[in-house]
């Protein structure tokens, strides 16, 4: 027998079994329909979509560190490598951001080890001590054409730690920078953190990243252009979001639809496994005989 004949025979056998067990057949058909009806009822009577108007945001400056950050503690900054030109850049950054001081290191690895050590011992330090806000690592000399640098901040969000003193990284997912994601894993309709003019987590402004980036860029411009003052004001503004439809059912289906599919098909899968095991135990084989040809 060919593959098509085997498939037709298997299909015929299943149809015969379904006819012989009407209650089981009814249950296999009714369970998926039951969960579909639940979703329809949720859409019709419980979960309603809502029209949201467009959202616009006001601009904010990044010339200084955010007030919440400066009110929390006094800050200092690390940098590498510890050369005269890089120190000149970092002195201008410290002046603009009102940092207590800047500390130089020979290379980035040494700087990171010191920053990690202080992060681990931060609870033992006095509130009067100046803490490292982060580190700036330059990858090449400032005398070259392109200047490349890294901003190395703590993996823990200072904003979350301020608001939740006992929070841990594994408990609060927004405490990290989430740089491995371009978009959230589950995207909600409408703007993310619609009430926040800064954009919500990860907190690039609240944790000082934007202010540091702007201060370093401005210091490099002054250094390369031999200027003492740059009459440029930089402000940041969130992109506006157009009119949209807020549908909570979409968000709910993203997490519950796989579970509903599993529950609707689990009874059918159990029956199939039971029939297969029974046939193997009894060593049964199915043959469809054309009695007219035999006679």
Image (spheres, rainbow, N blue to C red):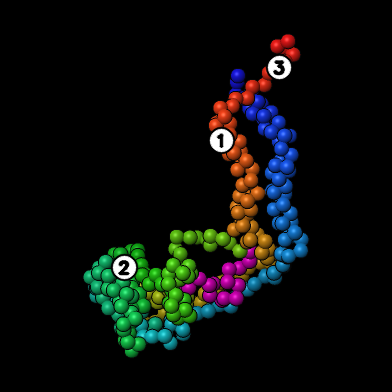
- Local SS, label 1: helix
In the rendered structure, the answer to whether residue 187 lies left or right of residue 132 reads right
Are the residues tagged 2 and 1 within 8 Å (C-beta)?
A: no
Are the residues tagged 3 and 1 within 8 Å (C-beta)?
A: no
With respect to residue 152, does 229 lie above or below? below
Q: Nearer the viewer, mark 2 or mark 1?
A: 1
As measured in the structure, the alpha-carbon distance from the residue carrying label 3 to the one carrying label 1 is 28 Å
With respect to residue 266, does 16 lie above or below? above
Where residue 194 appears, as percent x and y from the top left, is 60, 72
Q: Quadrant of residue 146?
A: bottom left
Disc number for residue 138: 2
User: Which residue is depicted at the point 66% across and 26% down?
Assistant: 8
In the rendered structure, the answer to whether residue 60 lies left or right of residue 49 reads left
With respect to residue 169, does 73 lie above or below? below
- Residues 105 and 263: in front is 263
Task: Report the label total.
Answer: 3
- Is-magenta flag for residue 120? no
Q: Nearer the viewer, mark 3 or mark 2?
A: 3
Q: Nearer the viewer, mark 3 or mark 1?
A: 1
Near mark 3 (Cα within 10 A), the count class, few <14, some 14-19 or many ≥20, is few
Near mark 2 (Cα within 10 A), the count class, few <14, some 14-19 or many ≥20, is some
- Local SS, label 2: strand
- Local SS, label 3: loop
- Is-magenta flag for residue 197? yes
Q: Which residue is mark 3?
A: 290
Specify whether residue 64 is in view: no
- Residues 59 and 127: in front is 127
Q: Which residue is mark 1?
A: 277
In the rendered structure, the answer to whether residue 244 lies left or right of residue 273 reads right
User: Which residue is depicted at the point 60% across and 76% down?
Assistant: 195
As measured in the structure, the alpha-carbon distance from the residue carrying label 3 to the one carrying label 2 is 84 Å
Q: Give the magenta part as a residue range.
A: 189-204
């Amino acid at each position: 027998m060919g593959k098509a004949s085997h498939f037709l025979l298997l299909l015929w056998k299943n149809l015969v079994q379904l006819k012989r067990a009407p209650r089981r057949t009814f249950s296999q058909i009714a369970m998926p329909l039951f969960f579909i009806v639940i979703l329809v009822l949720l859409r019709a009577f419980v979960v309603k979509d809502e029209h949201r108007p467009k959202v616009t945001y006001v601009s904010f400056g990044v010339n200084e560190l955010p007030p919440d950050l400066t009110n929390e503690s006094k800050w200092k900054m690390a940098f590498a490598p510890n050369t005269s030109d890089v120190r000149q850049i970092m002195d201008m950054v410290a002046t603009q951001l009102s940092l207590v001081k800047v500390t130089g290191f020979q290379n980035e690895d040494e700087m990171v080890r010191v920053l990690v050590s202080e992060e681990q011992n931060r609870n033992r330090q006095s509130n009067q001590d100046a803490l490292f806000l982060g580190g700036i690592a330059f990858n090449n000399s400032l005398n070259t054409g392109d200047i490349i640098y890294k901003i190395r901040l703590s993996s823990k969000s200072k904003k979350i730690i301020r608001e939740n003193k006992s929070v841990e990284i594994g408990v609060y997912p927004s405490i990290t920078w989430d740089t491995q994601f371009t978009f959230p894993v589950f995207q909600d309709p409408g703007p993310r953190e619609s009430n926040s003019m800064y954009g919500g987590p990860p907190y690039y402004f609240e944790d000082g990243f934007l202010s540091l980036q702007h201060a370093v860029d401005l210091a490099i411009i002054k250094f390369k252009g031999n200027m003492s003052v740059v009459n440029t004001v930089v402000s940041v503004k969130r992109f506006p979001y157009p009119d949209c439809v807020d549908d909570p059912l979409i968000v709910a289906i993203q997490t519950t639809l796989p579970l509903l599919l599993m529950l609707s098909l689990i009874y059918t899968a159990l029956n199939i496994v039971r029939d297969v095991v029974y046939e193997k135990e009894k060593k049964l084989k199915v043959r469809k005989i054309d009695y007219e040809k035999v006679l």
